[in-house]
Amino acid sequence: KNMVTIKAQYANKSGDDRKEADDGVKDNFVENMEDFVKDAKEISNELRASFDKSIKDIIDLAVSFGEKKTIEVADFFKIWVDFMTSWGKAREAIRKRMAAEKKKQKLLEKKMKLKKKLERRVSKQVE
């Protein structure tokens, strides 16, 4: 839209105004910008198509997990974020529990070793 406006303004200039400025430099802005706008539109259209395909693929994935087709992408990702948070907390709880059990086992082994040592002392004293 803006490029059309710029072209129209450029076309309305007199021929002498368009050819060269006071410093002898030709004004190529419109020609250069036409190429730029064309390239930018192509790139942005490709990006938009890729984005739309990604959104469709995410919705399809959500549907394959049993969600409704009307689910928002943010809502679907929230399910995953909540799951990952919960999973991380569960892993941490398991790690703590295993560390406590390991500590308890080492303490028990130490007690058993001490008990055997005391039993040997007692048995040597009796003999």
Image (cartoon, grey):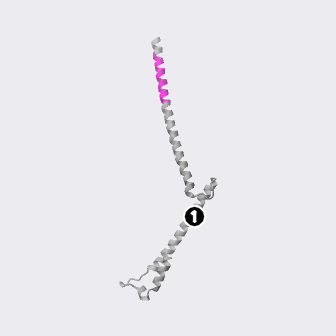
- Give the residue at x 49% y 74%: 37
Magenta span has 111?
yes
Binning the other alpha carbons within 10 Å of mark 1 as few (below 14), some (14 to 19) or many (20 upward) gives few
- Give the residue at x 63% y 56%: 68
Q: Amino acid at mark 1?
A: Asp
Q: Which residue is mark 1?
A: 52
Magenta stretch, main secondary structure class: helix
Q: Which residues are magenta?
A: 105-121
Residue 29 location in percent, x, y? 44, 79
State the image quarter where residue 69 is shown: bottom right
State the image quarter where residue 63 is shown: bottom right
Q: Nearer the viewer, residue 119 or 60?
A: 60
Q: Is residue 30 above or below residue 80?
A: below
Element class at badge 1 = helix
Q: Is residue 24 above or below residue 40?
A: below
How many marks the image carries: the answer is: 1
Q: Nearer the viewer, residue 3 or 71?
A: 71
Residue 59 location in percent, x, y? 60, 58
Q: Is residue 104 left or right of residue 54?
A: left
Extreme residue toward the top, this view: 127
Q: Is residue 80 left or right of residue 19?
A: right
Magenta span has 90?
no
Q: Is residue 86 above or below residue 63?
A: above
Residue 72 location in percent, x, y? 58, 58
- Give the residue at x 56% y 51%: 79
- Give the residue at x 46% y 77%: 32
Q: Nearer the viewer, residue 5 or 92?
A: 5
Q: Is residue 116 above or below residue 10?
A: above
Residue 85 location in percent, x, y? 52, 47
